Image (cartoon, coloured by chain):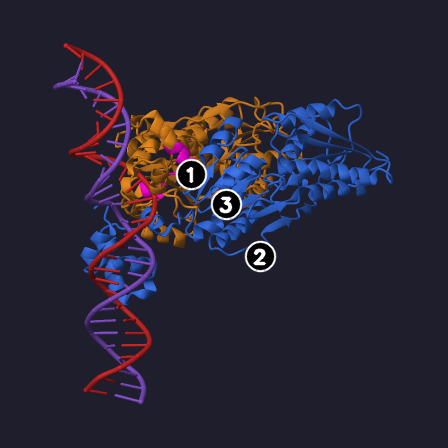
Chain colours: A orange, B blue, C red, D purple
DNA sequence: CGCCGTCGTGACAACGTTTGCAAAAATGAT
DNA sequence: ATCATTTTTGCAAACGTTGTCACGACGGCG
């Protein structure tokens, strides 16, 4: 009862096991009448097709792996996951998450043992840098590899990324156009050795500032604080320690910008009255606190990546395998034309 | 090359397939020398044990299902997921998420077809009410069912829940003890037909108020707004429309409290100067905005549930199958003794 | 020197599906 | 009716493992 197989169903329905199999996987190939018999027998016996057996026979596991480095519950990661799930769930796929790629040890172990090998049909690498040895190892799983926000995607079968540098360039330019003279970029330090695509944002900031400093009377600087739980507080302290408080702040991400806005308020710095601030992500609460920010849509990226994966699994080549998406400036209330009167 | 089987490895290593199998699953049973031969052959051939084949043979799928109703990326759900993953990943299990249980249609389909049947070793039901028909159906998967924050858990094999009613009772009592006279409870309306454990919080609020209204000069009311994206804004509007602004607000959840604190500020209501407010969850940013709240630890709940599941899968009975956890009052800065002078 | 226990290994039969091939049944045209 | 199609069905051989059983080698013991 608890474990009926296709054989039992066949017996009860009075047909062969092939017919039962077809009734489930290729219903168009069996007559209406037989299908009904099979289905009701299956219902009676609490039967469903076993995915494991199917996987064994067909070679398709109907699983994919999502590798991630950062905190598993981060807003961005979960949206990507949801996007993948939107597409893959309907296609009959399950997604296994691998978060245990955080420490150097765990990484090493993961890329040596490759536990996903022969157990997934595709691998998604989400938002962390990976060195050439790791890429080489990963290739040994012999399934499509899709990168999401990965610095160097050239080695993967497909990828979708945000244009981090261009996005921050635009954000910075917006601040400059508003007439600000003293802009600081706050970011948390890059992890040792591991390059992340988020680090490109700083480059965009610097490029925009350098491009503008000839024409404008512009003072700019980068404030890099240690990564970890307290990075927003560290940034706050550093900001307040500055000789002169800036008239604009450009944040590496909303998770930096949001606490900053809230806490600076307590020190008498109100936006947009006293300074402009811009975030990056358009994450939850950005809207609530009226934060101007660069929007990226990680869920859409997930869906996009999933579609590419499905194509690759089917043996086709997706149209534009490597896609770069431009983030969009979302104007809200945390920026304003710089008041020269001050 | 891309798909070596245990047979190929056996050939290269010059041993039988049984030995290869044992080298992986019961390494203690094969000699050091043979194991090395096998492992190096496996490495050469890019081989890993196929989970599907193992699952087929052993009857264990090494997968579990996590059913959820609410928005997949909600903080709470993701923390629960992370907690499950903490324990289950190490035990060799993968977690498949089922979010497509949102509309009545999808629910019906899910509980009729039971796609998880024969494909998982356990089912977790996370934070949504489920009617008796659905429970009956779910039982037909014939694997352990573990509830997480489910109103009536009696039908499950195990469960872990927050004591929502008692938690909100405590929160309300705290507000009353602070001397507040006019307390409103803001919540989003319960979904039609589907009872959620979160709805118990309202009962705790009412109970605390009723218990206190004889001794204190207490005025209280429940403000229930339509569910959906805009619920915090609706609550804000309703609050401002009140004849008299309350001196204390009790929120069903942090996601209600946080926007309220931020937006009320703009209307000149500052906490704790003008009113006290208390949340429920201790979600991200609660700390940033200094919100006093009832903390629950969903990640720990996930781990707890996972351990129970592992026991059940192994055929044992977990110690206390049904556990209720008390949330804790986290005192921060959004509450104060009511200033009678006002 | 024979007996027994232990250890390491191999043979082989499952586990529950899918699928190519061929046979049987139903349908249509004459 | 007959024959030519087309639709529906059954047979049987995989797919890649695990686990039971049995066999040989080895060492200790009487």
Tell me the number on the disc at residue A199.
1
**Residue marked by disc 3:** B82
**Residue B259 highlighted magenta (yes or no):** no
**How many tags in the picture?**
3
Quarter holding the C terminus of chain A is top right
Quarter holding the N terminus of chain A is top left
Give neighbour class at mark 2: few <14, some 14-19, many 20+ (Cα, 10 Å): few
Q: Are marks 3 and 2 in contact (CB under 8 Å)?
A: no
Start-end of magenta stretch? A38-54
| SS for dot 1 | helix
Query: Residue placed at 26% from the left, 59% from the top?
Result: B18
How far from the left and from the top, in percent, is residue C22? 16, 33
Is the residue at mark 2 from the same chain as the one at mark 1? Answer: no
- Give me the C-alpha separation between circle 3 and circle 2: 23 Å
How far from the left and from the top, in percent, is residue B108? 50, 30
Mark nearer the viewer, 3 or 2: 2
How far from the left and from the top, in percent, is residue A29? 29, 27
B24 shown above or below A117? below
The answer to which of marks 3 and 2 sits earlier in the sequence is 3
Q: Are marks 2 and 1 in contact (CB under 8 Å)?
A: no
| SS for dot 3 | helix
Give neighbour class at mark 3: few <14, some 14-19, many 20+ (Cα, 10 Å): many
User: Please, which chain is the residue tagged with disc 1 on?
Assistant: A
Query: Residue placed at 45% from the left, 36% from the top?
Result: B114
Would residue A74 be visible to someone looking at this image?
Answer: no
**Residue A46 highlighted magenta (yes or no):** yes
User: Please, which chain is the residue tagged with disc 3 on?
Assistant: B
Q: Toward the viewer: B62 or B135?
A: B135
Tell me the number on the disc at residue B125.
none
**Residue marked by disc 2:** B319
How far from the left and from the top, in percent, is residue B82? 50, 45
Determine the image quadrant of residue A247.
Answer: top right
């Amino acid at each position: 009862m608890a474990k009926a197989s296709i054989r039992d169903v066949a017996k009860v329905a009075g047909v062969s096991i092939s017919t039962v199999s077809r009734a489930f996987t290729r219903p168009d190939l069996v007559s209406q009448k037989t299908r009904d018999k099979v289905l009701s027998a299956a219902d009676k016996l609490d039967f469903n097709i076993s995915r494991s057996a199917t996987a064994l026979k067909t070679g398709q596991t109907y699983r994919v792996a999502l590798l991630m480095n950062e905190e598993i519950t981060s807003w961005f990661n979960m949206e990507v996951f949801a996007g993948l799930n939107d597409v893959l769930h309907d296609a009959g796929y399950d997604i296994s998450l691998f978060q245990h790629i955080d420490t150097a040890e765990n990484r090493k172990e993961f890329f040596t043992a490759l536990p996903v090998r022969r157990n997934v049909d595709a691998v998604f690498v989400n938002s962390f840098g990976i060195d050439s040895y790791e890429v080489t190892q990963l290739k040994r799983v012999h399934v499509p590899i899709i990168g999401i926000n990965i610095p160097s995607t050239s080695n993967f079968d497909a990828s979708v990324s945000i244009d981090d540098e261009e996005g921050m360039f635009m954000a910075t330019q917006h601040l400059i156009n508003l007439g600000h003279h003293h802009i600081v970029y706050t970011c948390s330090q890059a992890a040792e050795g591991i390059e992340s695509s988020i680090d490109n944002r700083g480059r965009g900031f610097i490029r925009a500032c350098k491009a503008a400093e000839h024409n404008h009377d512009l003072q700019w600087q980068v404030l890099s604080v240690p990564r970890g739980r307290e990075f927003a507080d560290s940034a706050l302290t550093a900001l307040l320690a500055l000789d002169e408080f800036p008239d604009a702040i450009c944040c590496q991400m909303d998770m930096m910008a949001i606490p900053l806005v809230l806490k600076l308020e307590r020190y008498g710095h109100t936006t947009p009255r006293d300074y402009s601030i811009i975030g990056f992500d358009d994450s939850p609460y950005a809207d609530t606190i009226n934060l101007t920010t660069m929007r990226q849509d990680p869920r859409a990226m997930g869906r996009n990546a999933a579609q590419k994966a499905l194509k690759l699994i089917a043996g086709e080549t997706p149209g534009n395998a490597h896609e770069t998406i431009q983030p969009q400036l979302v104007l809200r209330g945390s920026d304003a034309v710089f008041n020269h009167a001050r």
